[in-house]
Amino acid sequence: MSNVKAIEKIEPREIRRKLGLNQQQFWSKIGVTQSGGSRYESGRNMPKPVRELLRLVHVEQVDIQRVKREDIEVIDYLKSQEPELLKTLRKAAKAKAKKAA
């Protein structure tokens, strides 16, 4: 299954319940009102940016409060100019995370 298809199949209600959060707690972390989140949980189409934020915050556990524009700029630079270095850095970060777990 491709990553795009996985994002499209995100079930927000299921994720929220697994995390043990109420709608207010869950949706406010990505800037969506409780009533808007309720509509998404009831089947309304979720815009791609909202789906992506949901995935990043609640599935990947990224603290978006800590991500800065310069972080994105560095990643973009590495992707275009130093892809092998980016690959090496990702491997090192994963290895460190495994040791910490």
Image (tube, rainbow, N blue to C red):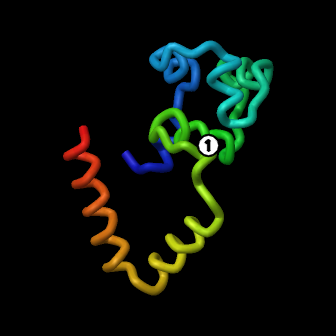
The quarter of the picture where residue 39 lies is: top right
User: For the point 25% across and 43% down, which residue is it?
Assistant: 100
User: For the point 57% across and 25% down, which residue is it?
Assistant: 12
Type of amino acid at the residue the image marks with label 1: Leu
Nearer to the camera, 12 or 97: 97
Position of 55 compared to 86: left or right? right
Q: Residues within 10 Å of mark 1 (few under 14, many from 20)?
A: some
Give x and y (percent) for residue 68: 62, 60
Tell me the quarter of the image containing the C terminus: top left
Position of 98 compared to 69: left or right? left
Position of 56 compared to 51: left or right? left
Give x and y (percent) for residue 11: 53, 26
User: In the rendered view, would you say 95 is above or below 7?
Assistant: below
- The extreme bottom residue here reads 81
Mark 1 sits on what residue? Answer: 53
The quarter of the picture where residue 42 lies is: top right
User: For the point 67% across and 16% down, which residue is it?
Assistant: 23
User: In the rendered view, would you say 62 is above or below 12?
Assistant: below
User: In the rendered view, would you say 12 is above or below 83?
Assistant: above
- Element at badge 1? helix
Nearer to the camera, 84 or 89: 89
Give x and y (percent) for residue 36: 78, 25
The tally of labels here is: 1
User: For the point 54% across and 20% down, which residue is it?
Assistant: 16
Give x and y (percent) for residue 83: 38, 79
Tell me the quarter of the image containing the N terminus: top left
